[in-house]
Amino acid sequence: MVVNLYFKDPHILPERGFGYLIPRSIPFAQNPERALGVVFDSDAVKGQDTASGTKVTVMLGGHWWDAFDAYPDEEEGVNMARAVLHRHLKISDKPAATRVSIQRNCIPQYTVGHESRMQAAHVDLMREFKGKLAVAGNSYTGVGLNDCVRAARDVVMGMKRGTVSTGLEDAGRKDLYVQVTLPSAAEIDAETRRREGRS
């Protein structure tokens, strides 16, 4: 479920930026709506509107709601989104406008064996098209917009250099990514207390 909220106050957000995603590791007590993330639309796409105010998008559910027989209605969706904004950002103002929509199957989630299938697809594309067809998109090497743009650029630049023939040459390579160690919840809590002067 995607909930768009518009607030008349152009300074309602306590932070500036694109927004944030909520990791799976967050306990249910801290995320009972099973929110996936919040986008600060007014910051993410500056200058898109002539009206002042703040637009925010709250993404709810996704795979967390797979077992639901029915989804929340519009009013429930708005209330859930407002609860997320209140808990995370201390926003309690009532939005001037809202829009709620269910987005079914909107973000691909790769299943076990995806890399192997992409390696096989590379071989099949080479056999059938002899390097004359290359692919890019969220079904192949990353589901996000940034992944798609990067993949399209890599395909074009690789074709120009003569190093890409299908766009799937690198499927399964582990050296393409940087491993990042994330802090534990206790470390995040300690850092938050330190920043708020509550050591």
Image: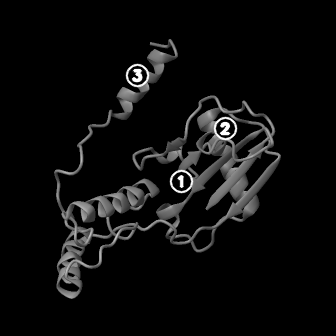
Residue ID for mark 3: 190
**Based on the displayed image, in which of its 4 quarters is residue 55 positioned?**
top right
Type of the residue with mark 1: Arg
Residue 50 lies, in percent from the top left, at 79, 44
Residue 139 lies, in percent from the top left, at 37, 70
Label 3's element? Answer: helix
C-alpha distance separating marks 3 and 1: 24 Å
Could you tell me which residue is drawn at 78 percent across and 37 percent down? 93
In the visual, does 107 lie left or right of 54? left
Residue ID for mark 2: 86
Residue with the most extreme bottom position: 128
Could you tell me which residue is drawn at 53 percent across and 65 percent down? 65
* Quarter the N terminus occupies: bottom right
From the viewer's perspective, is residue 28 above or below residue 109? above
Viewer-closest of 15 and 184: 15
Viewer-closest of 125 and 156: 156
C-alpha distance separating marks 2 and 1: 15 Å
Could you tell me which residue is drawn at 33 percent across and 72 percent down? 135
Please tell me which of labels 2 and 1 falls first in the chain.
1
Residue ID for mark 1: 34
Viewer-closest of 146 and 116: 146
